[in-house]
Image (cartoon, grey):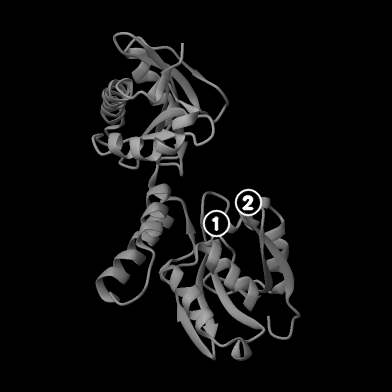
Amino acid sequence: MRGAPPTIVELRAADGDSVSLAVKGFSADGALLATVSDATLLRAAERGYLHCTPDLLDAVAATPASARPTKRSTALVLLGGPGLAPPSNLGTAAAADWLRADDVRTDADHWFLGTWERDGQVHRAVWDYLHPSAGQAAADSLSAALQFVLDRQPGMPIDVIEANRLLMSLTVDAGRDPLGELAGVLEALGVRSDLLHEDGPLGFSMGGETVDWDCLAEIVDRTWLVVYAMLPIVIDGSRLADAPRLAGQINARLQIGCLLVEEESGTTMYRAAIDLSAPSGHTSSIRRLLDQVHRDVVACLQLLDDEPAVEAVR
């Protein structure tokens, strides 16, 4: 790989932006070696591209602009599903060709910044403790990496919430269908549901003693089942300024969800969610979520009914 000019490859970010890499090749252990501009690294840290953690932004920003190198060497670890296992010992051109051969390989969300070089010093991010792999093996590697950091390197900065979210998403059974399971629970309760699009959301209705309301359910980040209940109540336009106070008072009494008020129209909505990353017990968890949604929505309707600023939608 020495002496070969780098080849520019763009990794696509979820927000439509991109991360420009000057690819140098793949190492013997399957890490992608590249250089990035200082501006690109700062943008990646600010926006969380390549799963950069906040400490990277602080470290780069702390370097005086005059002392910042034009390029920073990095090593990236690929972690994802089938077909994403990276090659090893590839030179510049072959590495770039491999990346460009499949759009999924240039999805920035699959790449983790493992190391980065600053002032001649190589810094390891938590992702450098991963081993390039795929599927459940990748989840095991991530779990081992996190445990190593937490046990032996307590001073290393890490966005634990982000890391745990990634671990959960990797351990979810790819064949599981949470919306299908929700539809099954609803059917057992005698409630009809409709899948509005192939990947959701799932629409259904619930009801109290005197009023019904529509609901939508969707899967967020592969592990979270989120249910939205559209309340048949509108906050009067002249009282919208008081809506945050009203919502806050009601939310203080709720269990797991929250009341939301649309700022311009005054329409009201209740939202609740559960994490389905556990390997079993989905049916009972979904049933408990639906029971809680019903109880909280009824409570919201009763509390809102006493407010002069609200109107029922018929």
- Tell me: 183 left or right of 9: left
Element type where label 1 sits in the image? helix
For label 2, the residue is 104
Q: Does residue 174 lie above or below 203 as drawn? A: below
Among the 4 quarters of the image, the one containing residue 55: bottom left
Residue 168 is at least partly visible in this image: yes
Indicate whether 232 appears above or below 58: above
In the picture, the disc for residue 110 is 1
Report the Cα–Cα distance between label 2 and label 1: 8 Å
Query: 286 above or below 148?
Result: above
Give the residue at x 57% y 76%: 74
Residue 152 % position (x, y)? 27, 75
The picture places residue 294, in percent across and down from the top left corner, at: 30, 22
Q: At label 2, which amino acid type do we have?
A: Val
Picture residue at 46% right of the left edge, 44% below the top = 221
Specify whether 88 is left or right of 137.
right
Q: Residues within 10 Å of mark 1 (few under 14, many from 20)?
A: many
Give x and y (percent) for residue 28.
Answer: 55, 74
Whether residue 51 sits left or right of residue 89 in the image: it is left
Residue kind at label 1, given as amino acid type:
His
Please say whether residue 275 is visible from this viewpoint: no
2 and 1 marks in contact (CB < 8 Å): yes
Q: Nearer the viewer, residue 24 or 91?
A: 24
Q: Secondary structure at mark 2?
A: helix
- Horizontal and vertical percent position of residue 32: 59, 70
Say which quarter of the image contains residue 231: top left
Q: Nearer the viewer, residue 57 or 1?
A: 57
Question: Foreground residue, 184 or 105?
Answer: 184
Residue at 37%, 73% in the rendered image = 157
Query: Which of marks 1 and 2 precedes in the sequence?
Result: 2
